[in-house]
Amino acid sequence: MITRDSGPQPADFADVRATNLAVVLRHVRTHAPCSRADIAATTGLNKATVSSLVTDLIERRLVREVGMTENRIGRPAMMLVLDGSPYAAVGLEINTDYLTAVALDLAGERLLSWRRAFTGTPGQPGQAIASLAALARRAVSKMEREGRQVLGLTVAVPGLVDADGVVELAAGLGWHQVDLRKSLTAALGEPAYPLLVENDANLAVLAEQRLSFTPDLVYLTGGASLGAGIICDGRPLRGARGFAGEFGHLPLDPAGPLCTCGRRGCLEAYAGLGALIRAALPDVGIETALSPSEFGPHVDEIHRLAKAEDPQVLTALTDVGRHLGHAISLLTNLINPACVALGGYFTVLSPWLIPPATAELESRSIAANCGGTRLVASALDSSAAAAGGATRVLDAIDAGVLPPPQTAPLPR
Amino acid sequence: MITRDSGPQPADFADVRATNLAVVLRHVRTHAPCSRADIAATTGLNKATVSSLVTDLIERRLVREVGMTENRIGRPAMMLVLDGSPYAAVGLEINTDYLTAVALDLAGERLLSWRRAFTGTPGQPGQAIASLAALARRAVSKMEREGRQVLGLTVAVPGLVDADGVVELAAGLGWHQVDLRKSLTAALGEPAYPLLVENDANLAVLAEQRLSFTPDLVYLTGGASLGAGIICDGRPLRGARGFAGEFGHLPLDPAGPLCTCGRRGCLEAYAGLGALIRAALPDVGIETALSPSEFGPHVDEIHRLAKAEDPQVLTALTDVGRHLGHAISLLTNLINPACVALGGYFTVLSPWLIPPATAELESRSIAANCGGTRLVASALDSSAAAAGGATRVLDAIDAGVLPPPQTAPLPR
DNA sequence: ATCTTTAGTTGGGACGGTAAACGAACTAAG
DNA sequence: CTTAGTTCGTTTACCGTCCCAACTAAAGAT
């Protein structure tokens, strides 16, 4: 990929070719169906170059000819579209109460969407990894039975993941220093495709970005713990040590309620799923610890009561929304995203959360009109992080890491 | 410049050449003096390619041969260094109480550092622009008299600047919708070099980065207003509308003291220069509005009293440090920078600010050891923003936008 | 004096983008 | 039906850049 950007790497012809292949591929993805002439006119590449690049992409089975245009002056154009059939990108998510698998084709169409209940034993990641590997094997086999080559697999984990795929810390899972990438690679028999591990919020925001097209975007995971996936200027923001987006433990009030992290007044203590359930459904979970497997039904119940305009639930939701707005105002002042998408349990409850959150945000933003930050419900469901994992594989393709040609070049 | 990064632009050989020229130039800057063979070995470029690139850089007068190595086995190497003499990068800063001009040579050596007192009339930017243009002309003339070509000029403004160089809002100057780039370009007679306008904090952090080498860095401007210049993953973070880094108006406490922006509990109301002076020097400025021209002497006085361990001043500084640590903990949780540099009046007072700020930061960070964030005094003085303006010009050179060759290619 | 080691240049080859010309396939109009 | 005009995509010749291998150059080591 060639851009006006700093990078210590020198460039050669392969980079030029890879860059231009990716340019053409992205154009086909976003403008399909389109002709070679369209591509040349829009990208500025020479017609001959585009022909050569398209031939290459067809040999790699990334692009397909679909037929001629008609009823136009001049020679009809051969239209091109992404070839969805020969490839698949797989994303997995492990969370406190479920495993998810998603597969997408090149165009981002969903090929597979599985979810299964799961409860791991804290401190015993081995069993969880075995379950994850089993799910991965089933998803990969299904793709391969359909004749698709798996381009890559990315696992979303609710915790801090380093660049080598080691889970430094995942409090909800009770994991500490787990080399998930290595273990899973071994469990899957050293597969040929790249296997990556990433934070769930950082992946979910990728999936959200593919739908929203915004280059400055934040995705908030709404669950027992709250995380933020941040994209600035089109690139994911991870921070120096990967701690960026620790949204749940933003200190809002040193005199606030006790948080699971041991401090007081974290956002999570106000707006985490546990706090919401305690405030909205005081009959449950005040005395006993909340079980992750109960979160789903509780959220459904809160949603039902909110629609029925239960005053206690509405008050609880307004309260959560206000604190969310407060925390988002910090985000706006520091990062100024164009859009903040509410994910997790926030998504379904957003009709009751967004109005108080927006009011709070407006009252706390220095910039007029909240600096242009829009608050929206996520376009994704609970498979967001897994879909983001698959999206990450597709993003690598878009960035120019293409599979090699499969058919021999045609004789002339 | 060629990197593994998304970008819609197709690439051709000119991009390859520009990328590799920049790679070699950066290597010479950071490893000078070095030989062609060193460059080839370190960058992975072919020896022949390096020779060709170096010849090109010498013709552009960006690099110079300085002499042979001695006392080694094998043929002695011809050492290369940056040629500092034929170019200059100019940065200007306009602020409430002064104008600053800085010029740097290619290697970042300071050629010029001017500062003059200045008080503008709010709502009347014309006079300020005339003063700024006069200063710019003097700086440019001095460089040209020394035989240096000006590569670019960047102006730092304490306010919101859009991508076209229009100052949307600069509260301290009383500016609103001032097209500074256009006005200054006209006042300087449509110069050949690029003239840019940027926010002061965004520029100061560039200068700080050149000294600290950290790719995840925040620079805090400490003055009447507080701003943050943020660099994430080596790139400046501006946000969707340029509002990123509005550090001073982070809402810390809705019940806090009144801020100049009309809200309550902004960081600036606790840790802005006005708040510090009121707390540390209660004899001044309680009744009358503080004049910007008095800020410098007041800071000197506070510094003197702090060294003398005046209890009231020490208490005020500890208080400011605590609030600073609180705000920085928000930065750490969201952006996770490797380093936060305290600029402006914070710099000289940092011995009294950093300990309480660090304590507060540690108590509020979810990540162990504050997520690795170090709090340091800025390595720059009050010319930080102007130096950053000049640095921005040098960064463009580093990124591959090179001046054209000046000498004809040597006959062979 | 000759060998070894390292520095830098030269020439050939490959690759990939560019430009202009060309053939192909269509519509429009006499 | 014929001719002109339009547009698509390929062909051909060309050029610039990088790489490789062989070469020259200049020193110390033997």
Image (cartoon, coloured by chain):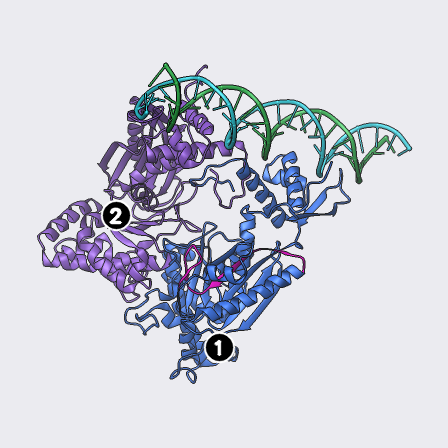
Chain colours: A blue, B purple, C green, D cyan
Q: Which chain carries label 1?
A: A
Q: In this view, does A207 lie above or below D11?
A: below
Q: What element carries label 1?
A: helix
B237 in the magenta segment: no
Mark 1–mark 2 Cα distance, whole angstroms, equals: 49 Å
Amino acid at the residue labelled 2: Gly
- Residue B270 x %, y %: 24, 59
Residue B144 relative to residue A35: left or right = left
User: What is the number of callouts on the image?
Assistant: 2
Q: What stretch is highlighted in magenta?
A: A146-168
Q: Is mark 2 on a helix, strand or loop?
A: loop
Q: Which corner quadrant of the image does residue B181 belong to?
A: top left
Residue B279 relative to residue A90: left or right = left
| Residue beneath disc 1 | A293
Query: Between A395 and B52, which is closer to the camera in this rendering?
Result: B52
| Residue beneath disc 2 | B343
Q: Which corner quadrant of the image does residue B383 belong to?
A: top left
